[in-house]
Image: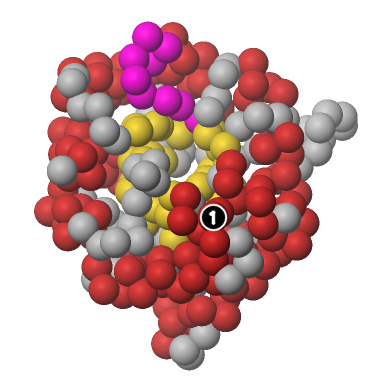
Amino acid sequence: MRKKLVAGNWKMYGSLNENKQLLDGIITGLNGLCNTHTAVCVPYPYLSSVQNALQDTQIAWGAQNVSQYEKGAYTGEVSVSMLNDFKCDYVIVGHSERRAIFGEDNNIVAEKYVKIQEAGMIPILCVGETLEQRESGITEQIIKEQLAAVIKRAGIISLSKAIIAYEPVWAIGTGKTASPEQAQDVHAFIRKGIADQDMGVAKELTILYGGSVKPNNASELFKMPDIDGGLIGGASLVASDFVAICRAMNI
Ligand code: PEP
């Protein structure tokens, strides 16, 4: 059976105090929930305190980005070995905010993906189209190109140690969720494209949906056959919302 995962993306929010309250609420709220894997991807400065808070729980943690370089004169960057020092399981790569605001193209994303896997962590590879691209009818082409760059660089088998997150850019942080059918269509397209190259990898691949997932829409999305969980932004900052979304996956 495919692994189910609900991962929070805290983005650039939080403080030591706020994080403590948030994690206390999540740990208490998730007590006893066992079918779903849960993770939080947090800002770098909080990795140490999050590791301390979560190390004896079933909740995993990770980062939201990493450098494509191993080490060196790259002021302001963070390497995979640094993330390993904090026992991160997951690293988000190719988030649309990194692509759009920080100019990360498909090749940079592929380099980062490789580094994350070489270091033994699991990339959560984000793909998704903008509103303009959807309206021009090129959603599938965009997703195909985003995936192809990674597959070309790392090989199809690499996806057996990765997670894909389909995140339509127009749904991220906008309150506009893709309908379960819209999301399912793209998830099925992704899985089929991978199945054409390796059936076994496609069957086992966890594909998350991300984009304004909230407690009131999570279960409809998670019921779809190719949606294996969620990457959650805004709602991952509210303990009761995040817990409710994890519970919706667990049904
Ligand atoms: C995200 O940041 O990956 C995301 C999906 O955000 P939100 O849930 O706020 O749309």
Q: Residue at x 36, y 24 (%)?
A: 59
Please identify the quadrant where the N terminus is shown.
Answer: top left
From the viewer's side, name the closer residue of 42 and 184: 184
Tell me what residue is drawn at x 64 percent, y 16 percent. 85
The quarter of the displayed image where residue 199 is located? bottom right
On screen, residue 135 versus residue 86, left or right, reads left
- 180 horizontally vs 153: left or right: left
Q: Is 163 above or below relative to 61?
A: below
Spot occupied by residue 172 in the image (x, y as percentages of width and height): 37, 60
Q: How is the image coloured?
A: secondary structure
Note whether 230 is above or below 133 in the view shown. above
Residue at 66 percent of width and 51 percent of height: 157
Q: Is mark 1 within 8 Å of ligand 1?
A: no
Residue furthest out toward the right = 73
The front one of 194 and 127 is 194
Q: Residues within 10 Å of mark 1 (few under 14, many from 20)?
A: few
Residue wearing tag 1: 200
Residue 165 drawn at (x, y percent): 46, 54
Q: Give the amino acid type for the residue marked by disc 1 in the picture.
A: Gly
Q: Position of residue 23 (x, y in %)?
A: 29, 21
Q: Which residues make up the magenta segment?
A: 53-62
Which secondary structure, mark 1?
A: helix
Does 58 appear in magenta? yes
Camera sees residue 176 = no
Q: Position of residue 21 (x, y in %)?
A: 25, 19
